Image (spheres, rainbow, N blue to C red):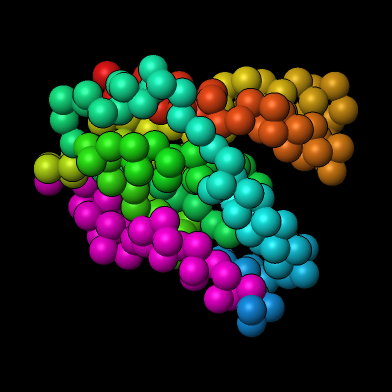
Amino acid sequence: MTATESIIEKSLKNSYSYTEYRNHVSQLLLEGLSTGTTQSEALTHYSTLNEVRMNRLDKTIKIPQDINDTLKNLDKEYTLLVISEGWCGDAAQILPVINKMTEATDRLDLQIVLRDDNPELMDAYLTNGSRSIPKLILLDKETLEPINSWGPRPAEAAKLIVDFKQKHGIINEEAKTELQKWYLHDKGLSTMQEIVGLLG
């Protein structure tokens, strides 16, 4: 077993199902807290906003027929291990989509771990040297061997952020608003297509 596989196995013992994750975040919010080692009013505020977003997406996300057919006909079983935190805006847009995909087939299993509780795993899956989330690690369900990884956001959304930063020099509230509008318009489709592309 490689070092990464050993870290993955350890992280899976620490993981939440989607329902458990949602309940954990909600419970912390009742206590005025967010997930993660850093606590602030801003993070709690974002976590509260994300609760509303995820509740809406759980009700509204629809899987197109072609993607549904692909998911139902997968020839192997996978575990989708996702690194997240309750305050992360991208995770709030993406996790409900991944959850809907796993509900559409018995070939996918979603497990969620918190970034700050699993630093070794996070550091094995950095994006351009940073601990960007959400990060999906695609595992062979039987062997837990990592096959691929994806995240922290779909390619088009990532480009939106890169272009904004090049133009304005910073990522501010305006950038975050533009990103949320993009997610609203996209309805999870890019996330579904890119993840299905990993399932080969």
Q: Residue at x 54, y 25 (%)?
A: 189
Q: Residue at x 41, y 27 (%)?
A: 195
Q: Is residue 14 above or below residue 174?
A: below
Among the 4 quarters of the image, the one containing residue 158: top right
Q: Is residue 116 above or below residue 73?
A: below
Left or right relative to 17: residue 126: right
Q: Position of residue 183 (x, y in %)?
A: 66, 32
Magenta-colored segment: predominant secondary structure: helix
Does residue 13 show up magenta in the picture? yes
Q: Position of residue 44 (x, y in %)?
A: 71, 67
Magenta range: 1-29
Looking at this view, name the residue that lies furthest to the bottom.
31
Count of all numbered marks drawn on residues in the image: 0
Left or right relative to 162: residue 144: left
Q: Nearer the viewer, residue 131 or 82?
A: 82
Residue 87 seen from this side: no
Q: Residue at x 41, y 21 (%)?
A: 65
Q: Residue at x 58, y 41 (%)?
A: 60
Among the 4 quarters of the image, the one containing residue 154: top right
Left or right relative to 47: residue 86: left
